[in-house]
Image: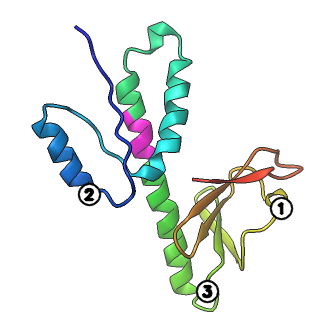
Amino acid sequence: MQFHTHAVTTDHQTDKEALSQALAKAGITAEVYPLHMQRQAGLLASLLADLPLDQRRNTRSTFDRWVKEAIAWRDDVRALAIKYRANHPEEAGGVVMITNGQVYGWKDQLRDPRSEAPGAVAVSSEGQIFVAAGGNNYDGAEYWALA
């Protein structure tokens, strides 16, 4: 039996449900995720491809689990930022800073990543999520990655 994997690239305005239904009508079983997940999907696919052959049997379920976890993580950090902003209306705009699942402050703008440890998260007032990446805990992160 041969299996095929399909990827669908759309813009952010595509109706996820309508696309899922159209694919199902065509006999294609697929998971549809928003555009912002494509970068992470490529990374996850490359990680799965690096697994030894004997460990690739359940890669589809592993991939699906990782994508769902990434979506849940985004929802969680956005919820933390929304709650913080509701309790601190004087801190409009800027970014809410989160690490280890806890808000640790607010900044009027995204600043030099070297002032943050890798893994720190900044959530803008528009809901964009940035993760401090590279570097180390002593020297700070090297750059901000859009999550």
> CA separation, marks 3 and 2?
31 Å
**Residue 58: horizontal and vertical position, in percent?**
37, 20
Q: Secondary structure at mark 3?
A: loop
Q: Secondary structure at mark 2?
A: loop
- Which residue is rendered at x = 79% and y = 51% of the image? 141
Q: Mark 1 and 3 residues: CB-CB less than 8 Å, in contact?
A: no
- The stretch drawn in magenta includes residue 74: no
Residue at numbered disc 2: 15
> CA separation, marks 1 and 3?
21 Å
- In this rendering, the answer to whether 94 lies above or below 28 is below
Q: Mark 3 and 2 residues: CB-CB less than 8 Å, in contact?
A: no
| Residues packed near mark 3 inside 10 Å, few (<14), some (14 to 19) or many (20 plus) | some
Q: Which mark is residue 115?
A: 1
Query: Dominant secondary structure of the magenta stretch?
Result: helix
Q: Secondary structure at mark 1?
A: helix
- In this rendering, the answer to whether 3 lies above or below 120 is above
- Which residue is rendered at x = 10% and y = 39% of the image? 25
- Which residue is rendered at x = 47% and y = 38% of the image? 41
Front disc: 3 or 2: 2
Q: Earlier in the sequence, mark 1 or mark 3?
A: 3
* Residue type for callout 3: Ala
Residue at numbered disc 3: 92
Which span of residues is magenta-colored?
64-69
Q: Mark 1 and 2 residues: CB-CB less than 8 Å, in contact?
A: no
- Numbered circles on residues, count: 3
* Residue type for callout 1: Ser
